[in-house]
Image: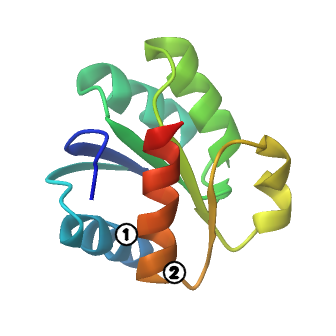
Amino acid sequence: MNLCGRHVLIIEDEMLIALEVEALLSDIGYQTFDFVDTPARAVAAARAHRPDLVTADYRINEGTGVEAVAGVWEAIGRVPVVYVTGNVEMVQWQGTVPVVDKPIQAAALAAACRRACAG
């Protein structure tokens, strides 16, 4: 798999799901991960350790994944993003950003990462 890099920022307020995303991404070659559950923490984590890829749920603590991604992009510039959410209808308007529905399928997440990193 052609990765964007090695470090992922996982924006998810349910730790079991965040750990599942980490495990699936580890299987395809990503090596380091930061976990956050709010837009403010996402920006702080991105500034502290620039991610090569961001995964974001839509519904998170104190806001949305869309707000978190916007804050990250404003703080450090655009990085590839994949939304991993049970609220697909809330992020489909994002257009070019790949969306993976929950429950997460490994092949769908891998394909979304390839798409995000290619574009």
Q: Position of residue 103 (x, y in %)?
A: 57, 85
Decide if residue 97 is on the left or right side of residue 48. Answer: right
Q: Nearer the viewer, residue 49 or 78?
A: 78
Q: Is residue 115 above or below residue 69?
A: below
Q: Count the marks.
A: 2
Q: Residues within 10 Å of mark 1 (few under 14, many from 20)?
A: many
112 relative to 58 in the view: left or right: left
Residue at 76% in and 66% down: 88
Report the residue marked by disc 2: 104
First in sequence, mark 2 or 1: give its number: 1
Dot 2 lies on which element? loop
Q: Residue at x 29, y 66 (%)?
A: 22
Q: Amino acid at mark 1?
A: Val
Q: Residues within 10 Å of mark 2 (few under 14, many from 20)?
A: some
Q: Residue at x 29, y 65 (%)?
A: 25
Q: Which residue is mark 1?
A: 21
Q: Quadrant of the C terminus?
A: top right
Horizontal placement of 7 versus 15: left or right?
A: left
Placement of 62 over or under 49, stated as above or below: below
- Displayed quadrant of residue 41: top left
In space, the residues marked 2 and 1 are separated at their CA atoms by: 8 Å
Tell me residue 2's x, y (percent).
28, 50
Q: Is residue 11 visible?
A: no
Q: Quadrant of residue 53?
A: top left
Residue 80 spot, x, y in % from top left: 48, 37
Q: Are the two marked residues, 2 and 1, in contact with CB atoms closer than 8 angstroms?
A: yes
Q: Secondary structure at mark 1?
A: helix
**Residue at far left of view:** 31
Side of 95 where 74 appears, left or right? left
Residue type at mark 2?
Answer: Ile
